[in-house]
Image: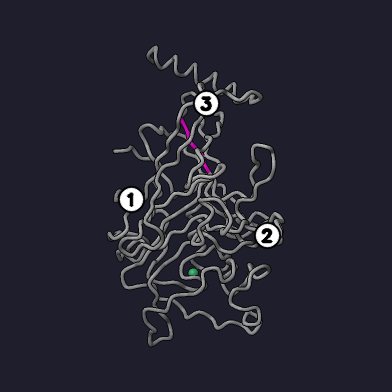
Amino acid sequence: MSAFNRFAVAIGGLAAISVAHAANKPDASERQPVAIRFALAAGDQPVECGHDIAGLGTGGQPAQLHDARFYIAAPVLIDAAGHEVPIELEQNDWQYANLALLDFENKTGKCVGSADVNDTIKGSAPRGRYKGFSFVIGVPSVVKDKDGKDVILNHSNFATAPAPLDLQSMTWNWQAGRKFIKIEVDPEGGVTRPPPKPKSPADAANGAGAQGDKSGDKSDGGAPAMADAPKAAPLRVNSDGTITVSTWMLHLGSTGCRGDATKGEITSCANPNRIPVKLSSFDSGRQRVVLDLKPLFAGIDLGKDQGFSTGCMSGPADPECAPMFENLGLRLKETAPDANDAGQSSGASTKIFRVEATK
Ligand SMILES: [Cu+2]
């Protein structure tokens, strides 16, 4: 080890100690800027709107990106001693509190959404050397502001929420909160699926926009009700009664939420569906974090959907959510009745992120 490196490690150790004793916050001169880049790929190919993506899922057909956005929270650097040091995020249109939105769709090709993209989180951390990085996929229910007051993040009204929580397209409904991950692809030839079930009279009575207690609506496999309506017209109706639609959708978010979010009651969700991600070896100066669509869609045939949402919208009964949640590293269902561990990390780390050198 060079003298320079020994010096840097010693400084890193001091920084970690001062954080461990966190009583006095290091002043600005003891902090360093942090920028962590993210990328979207399918194996070793970059994924972009308007370009065919090869090799996703078991069907073998190419697919085009339709949407690709996700929220990360609580970004943390890990030093050589294993201490976790929170990154303080800059506050801007992509970052609020300890939350950031990453956006890889630019509204070209088949991509919907907005022209803006964001692939980097920016902030600062105590000066030091760090060897790892961790974060959570998802939007926290509540964070504390500077005065120790609760700020509701997930279950807030997008129309009055600060950016990046102000996007209707990343919202399910007030009670269920945000879509943590929204990844949609259009496979060549479309997605063939059973026709949607006719609504029961009870559903009809509650109206198309019903919220509140409808979030556990079994007609969508338990996904938050109606938030993804209106459904696009099918590309075609097939002679065997199936329909073919254009887009396979992953919408991950909390389900089984209770409490009246419109009254500011903190809503609790049976299935939080937030994913902890830990990259034990990561150098933000030379590497970036890749969300890899190949492991995300492993074991899934994008050309066929067996029921409920086209794709997986976090519904515990949706057939496509079983392999998808396994790939995400989440438990789709409780391990035993009343175990209350559905929607938590399965204990296996998520397969969808990897680290690669920046070019
Ligand atoms: Cu499905």
Residue 294 showing in the rendered view: no
Circle 1: residue type: Gly
Q: Nearer the viewer, residue 105 or 184?
A: 105
- Label 2: which residue? 261
Is disc 2 surrounded by few (<14), some (14 to 19) or many (20+) residues within 10 Å?
A: many
Residue drawn at 43 percent across, 82 percent down: 242
| Residue 271 magenta-highlighted | no
For disc 1, the marked residue is 43
Number of the front mark, 2 or 1:
2
Residue 295 percent across, percent down from the top left? 41, 53
Q: Position of residue 163 (x, y in %)?
A: 51, 50
Quarter holding residue 183:
bottom left
- Amino acid type of the residue tagged 2 in the rendering: Ala
User: How far is disc 2 from disc 1 in space, using C-alphas?
Assistant: 40 Å
Cα separation between marks 2 and 3: 36 Å
Of the residues under marks 1 and 3, which one precedes in the sequence?
Answer: 1
